[in-house]
Amino acid sequence: MSTHRNVELPRADPTPTAPVRHALANGATWEGVDVLRYKQDPGVPFKDVTRQVLFQQPTLGCELRYFEVAPGGYSTLERHEHSHAVLILRGTGRCLVGDAVHLLGLHDLVHIPAMTWHQFRAGPDQPLGFLCMVNQQRDRPQLPTAAEQAALADHPAIAAFLAGPELPLP
Amino acid sequence: MSTHRNVELPRADPTPTAPVRHALANGATWEGVDVLRYKQDPGVPFKDVTRQVLFQQPTLGCELRYFEVAPGGYSTLERHEHSHAVLILRGTGRCLVGDAVHLLGLHDLVHIPAMTWHQFRAGPDQPLGFLCMVNQQRDRPQLPTAAEQAALADHPAIAAFLAGPELPLP
């Protein structure tokens, strides 16, 4: 797992130059912004997630990305030294942060502290789209060992969360 | 104007601690987030703008703020060495970036490069609410001199923009 602790270089996504890039019809894609695979690494578990890099510039300490989890999908269960600052831009879903599961709705804010297990899951009938602000220079995510995953699943609420897809939201 | 070039210390706004802070009914205010005055400095021109600091943490290189310009309002016409990364979260309006005026709608992205005159204006009948990502360590804004403002207003489109409020959007 030691390579997961290395600092990750900035990715080769294009740097925006246009002063204004309009959102396209669904409000979740943009002019000049590529819809990318969520993770490049093979073997990392996730389901039906896309990544778009909205702002990534040498003069900014952070990047702003947009992730969209399709209905029934989920992001990787992981942790890392860097923190995440998240705003829900579209849809609803749930997230695990540490040992608690939270219901998420439009414009809710999520703070993922350092070295805290986390995962985002869309409900079965709606996508979950969110902005994520993160330092440009950051460590690579760590995946849970089998023992760590079993310890998480000792919490009934987390076991139910990890077993998704969840019931439709009220 | 030399004091405007000093690096500004991080503001004393509260650091978020809750993993999830839900958006309140209108989606433009949040649990535990204060609605603040847009600018602290007296004599800086603006009209009907509020500021909310959504994420400001020592471990993050940037802050994420939410500004809302009420109908007919406008942010300060200014420039600075640091850049802005903006996403329109609510309503419609217009912005000046350099020597061009842009129409803005939901989820549009705006990049304000270094030392570029810029201003955001809501239309007469809708607010303009936007997220703004900015380096924590940054220089203070500079205001235009009378000569600089006159040079901007030599462009008819900019003169019309600065004379707002604009006509209702189609």
Image (spheres, coloured by chain):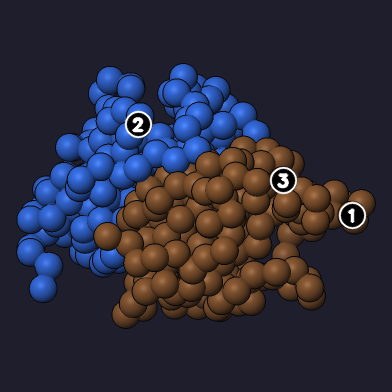
Chain colours: A brown, B blue
Q: Chain of mark 3?
A: A
Q: Residue at x 35, y 31 (%)?
A: B33
Crowding around mark 2 (Cα neighbors within 10 Å: few <14, some 14 to 19, many 20+) is: some
Please name the amino acid that badge 1 sits on: Met
Q: Relative to A133, does residue B92 appear above or below in the rendering?
A: below
Q: Residue at x 34, y 54 (%)?
A: A105
Q: Are marks 1 and 3 on the same chain?
A: yes
Crowding around mark 3 (Cα neighbors within 10 Å: few <14, some 14 to 19, many 20+) is: few
Numbered disc in front, either 1 or 2: 1
Circle 1 sits on which residue? Answer: A1
Give the secondary structure at mark 2. Answer: loop
3D distance between C-alphas at marks 1 and 2 = 38 Å
Q: Looking at the image, do the residues carrying marks 2 and 3 touch, with CB atoms under 8 Å apart?
A: no
Residue B143, picture quadrant: top left
Q: Is residue A66 visible?
A: no
Q: Is residue A86 visible?
A: yes
Q: Nearer the viewer, residue B149 or B115?
A: B115
Numbered disc in front, either 2 or 3: 3
Q: Position of residue A151 (x, y in %)?
A: 72, 46
Q: Which mark is residue A151?
A: 3
Task: Please indicate whether residue B102 sits to the left or right of residue A96 in the image.
Answer: left
3D distance between C-alphas at marks 2 and 3 = 34 Å
Give the secondary structure at mark 3. Answer: helix
Residue A16, picture quadrant: bottom right
Circle 2 sits on which residue? Answer: B33
Q: Hey, which residue is sitting farthest right in the picture? A: A2
Q: Residue at x 46, y 19 (%)?
A: B12
Q: Nearer the viewer, residue A152 or B126?
A: A152
Q: Position of residue B20 (x, y in %)?
A: 44, 41
Please name the amino acid that badge 3 sits on: Ala
